[in-house]
Amino acid sequence: MSDETPPDHIPDDIPGETPVQKALRLKTAKLEARPKPPRGGRFQREQAARLAAGKSKPWMTR
């Protein structure tokens, strides 16, 4: 699927919709169709257990 082609389940034109509204609707639908990262469970615990951003760079501290 290319960037210009909307998914099949989305109607092409809605009466009274401006081109900007249509572009926004198509963009949000495309973003919603993307695969989502796993939620909860082990993955989320691993993400939370990571080091804080500055902790891995001791030369950044005074």
Image (cartoon, rainbow, N blue to C red):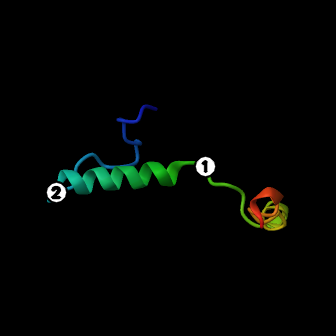
Three-letter amino acid code at the position of disc 1: Pro
Residue under the image location 83 percent in, 67 percent down: 45
2 and 1 marks in contact (CB < 8 Å): no
Q: Position of residue 21 (x, y in %)?
A: 25, 57
Q: Position of residue 2 (x, y in %)?
A: 42, 31
Kindly identify which residue carries mark 2.
15
Horizontally, residue 42 falls left or right of residue 21, namely: right
- Locate residue 59: give its quadrant: bottom right
Horizontally, residue 46 falls left or right of residue 13, namely: right
Kindly identify which residue carries mark 1.
35
Disc on res. 50: none
Residue under the image location 72 percent in, 57 percent down: 38
- Whichever of callouts 2 and 1 sits on the residue coming sooner in the sequence is 2
Asked whether residue 44 appears in the rendered view, the answer is yes
Q: Is residue 30 above or below residue 50?
A: above
**Mark 2 vs mark 1: in front:** 1
